[in-house]
Image: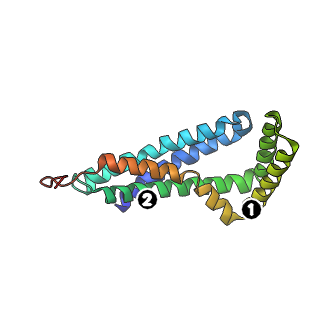
Amino acid sequence: MKKTVLTFGLISGAILSAWMLATVPFLEEVGDWGAVLGYTSMVLAFLLIFFGIRSYRDNVAGGTVRFGRALAVGTLIGVIASLCYVATWEVVYFKFMPDFPAKYQAHVLDKARANGETEEAIAKRKADLDKWAEMYKNPAINVAMTFAEPLPVALIIALVSAGVLSRRRKGTMANA
């Protein structure tokens, strides 16, 4: 299991990291489409969870795998890939984009003004963003927030893949 999880997790993580490195320079041009592109790349990279579970089932587990084991394999692949994503973001953020919170805050507030929000609502949003920016300076909180981006996507794909790929041993009845 260890080899399968590491192989597929690192490949998926490399895809996530490469996509991030390729798109970060265009962050301002992409604008609101950044989230769509980011989560689309996560789904594509996390398709390796499906292939990792299938590889484990076919090559390690003798052609059958129960749901729990398949979910564990998929979850571990997703965790490793997410850790690669986090490591890449930490380097990008602290070395190349320490002004990210200020730019993000300006973007959100400009968008709020363009949508006609009241100055009171904008002031509250600015206060919330100021708190967030202060918290985001703490590497532990930064890591936790960044880890929370890809992990839910990975868990959903692991859950679906485990359901699709799990098989009982021949001779057992599903409804018995």
Residue sitting at x 59%, y 51%: 149
Q: Mark 2 points at which residue?
A: 76
Q: Nearer the viewer, residue 127 or 104?
A: 127
Q: Quadrant of residue 143?
A: bottom right
Numbered mark located on residue 108 in the image: none
State which tag comes first along the sequence, 1 or 2.
2
The residue lying toward the viewer, choosing from 95 and 42, is 42
Whether the residues at callouts 1 and 2 have beta carbons within 8 Å, the answer is no
- Circle 2 residues within 10 Å: few <14, some 14–19, many ≥20: many
Position in image of residue 80 (x %, y %):
49, 57
Say whether residue 78 is left or right of residue 99.
left
Locate residue 131, reporting x and y percent: 78, 59
Q: How far apart are marks 1 and 2 (CA)?
A: 28 Å
Q: Along the line of sight, which residue is nearer the eye, 106 or 59?
A: 106
Please, what secondary structure does the residue beneath circle 1 have? helix
If the image is split into quadrants, where does the N terminus sit? Answer: bottom left
Q: Which amino acid does label 1 sit on?
A: Met
Q: Could you tell me which residue is drawn at 52 percent across and 54 percent down?
A: 151
Q: Nearer the viewer, residue 46 or 93?
A: 46
Q: From the image, tell me which residue sits under label 1.
A: 135
Looking at the image, is 29 positioned above or below residue 119? Answer: above
Position of residue 137 in the picture relative to residue 23 (left or right) = right
Q: Which residue is located at x 33 percent, y 55 percent?
A: 70
Q: What residue type is labelled 2?
A: Leu
> Of discs 1 and 2, which sits in the foreground?
1
